Image (spheres, rainbow, N blue to C red):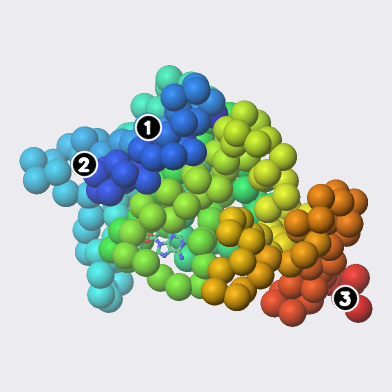
């Protein structure tokens, strides 16, 4: 799986992919992440990528040409399954979108800044628009990093315990059960006895029950028609 991220702030994306699971996925050859500086695709001396909005109003708008040049160069080298624009008015990212995108091969991700990007880039090139939530950030880099993280950890072989992504919150429509590790007692606070019992069937039943209880309390919306 290959990601090509187009941004005016490439250095902002140095760190998120250089640690832990995301770094390991790249080292194992399971994913490639390429970050492109949009300013390398400008034809003007100032390397500017934005201009005033037609019709007036506040804020600058990112221009078509640099994005188009970069996207078309990438497309001349390989085919892409998706060209994604990170934007607050896109579909809100959730586990099922991440699952869906984890089956794709090559993806381009566009990061906006200022007021956003010229609508024609969206109309002509973009195949999918994704938001990370109902709030506005100053740029698309952190949203892009979040999207890439959510997708890469689902690629088979990336997580050391392959079943662990499947038991995370949302995968089965439920939140995760409470988790504990040593010590068994800390300042009088004990780990539930059942987890120390060694009885796998009972532990699994307890976890199922806890998942349901937690989901009922915190996210009854996830239970939908099954709501009790
Ligand atoms: N004028 C836009 C916001 C622009 S914010 C609007 O009102 O919808 C600048 C850039 O940050 C956007 O182009 C987008 O790439 C990114 N961004 C901001 N908030 C985001 C969010 N919740 N999800 C995904 N991308 C976001």
Q: Tell me what residue is drawn at x 89 percent, y 72 percent.
A: 225
SS of the residue at dot 2? helix
SS of the residue at dot 1? strand
Of the two numbered discs 3 and 2 on the same chain, state the one appearing first in sequence.
2
Determine whether 70 is above or below 117 in the image. Answer: above
Determine whether 186 is above or below 85 in the image. Answer: below
Of the two numbered discs 2 and 1 on the same chain, state the one appearing first in sequence.
1
Q: Residues within 10 Å of mark 2 (few under 14, many from 20)?
A: some
Q: Tell me what residue is drawn at x 29 percent, y 41 percent.
A: 14
Task: Give percent across and percent down for residue 29.
Answer: 49, 22
Disc 3 to disc 2, C-alpha distance? 51 Å
Q: Mark 3 points at which residue?
A: 227
Asked whether, in this view, residue 105 is left or right of residue 27, the answer is right
Disc 2 to disc 1, C-alpha distance? 15 Å
Task: Give percent across and percent down for residue 166.
Answer: 72, 46
Which numbered dot is residue 39?
2
Asked if residue 8 can be seen in this view, the reply is no
Q: Name the residue under label 1.
A: 34
Determine whether 91 is above or below 226 in the image. Answer: above
**Ligand 1 closer than 8 Å to the CB at disc 3?**
no
Asked whether, in this view, residue 156 is left or right of residue 64, the answer is right
SS of the residue at dot 3? loop
Q: How crowded is mark 1: few (under 14 residues within 10 Å), some or many (20 or more)?
A: few
Task: Give percent across and percent down for residue 71.
Answer: 39, 35
Of the two numbered discs 3 and 1 on the same chain, state the one appearing first in sequence.
1
Which residue occupies the foreground of this view, 164 or 174? 164
């Amino acid at each position: 799986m290959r990601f090509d991220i187009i941004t005016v702030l490439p250095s902002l994306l140095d760190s998120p992919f250089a640690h832990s699971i995301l770094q390991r996925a790249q080292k194992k050859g399971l994913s490639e992440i390429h970050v492109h500086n949009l300013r390398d695709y400008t034809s003007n001396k100032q390397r500017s990528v934005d201009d005033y909005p037609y019709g007036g109003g506040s804020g600058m708008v990112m221009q078509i040409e640099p994005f188009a040049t970069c996207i078309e160069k990438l497309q001349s080298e390989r085919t892409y399954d998706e060209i994604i624009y990170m934007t607050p008015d896109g579909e809100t990212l959730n586990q099922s979108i991440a699952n869906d995108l984890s089956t794709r091969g090559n993806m381009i991700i566009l990061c906006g800044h200022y007021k956003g990007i010229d609508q024609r880039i969206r109309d002509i090139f973009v195949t999918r628009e994704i938001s990370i939530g109902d709030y506005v950030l100053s740029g698309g880099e952190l949203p892009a990093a979040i999207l890439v993280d959510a997708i890469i950890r689902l690629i088979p072989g990336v997580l050391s315990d392959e079943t662990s992504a499947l038991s995370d919150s949302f995968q089965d429509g439920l939140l995760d059960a409470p988790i504990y590790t040593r010590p068994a007692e800390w300042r009088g606070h004990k780990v539930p006895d059942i987890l120390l019992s060694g009885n796998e069937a009972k532990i699994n039943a307890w976890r199922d029950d806890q998942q349901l209880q937690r989901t009922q309390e915190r996210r009854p919306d996830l239970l939908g028609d099954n709501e009790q």
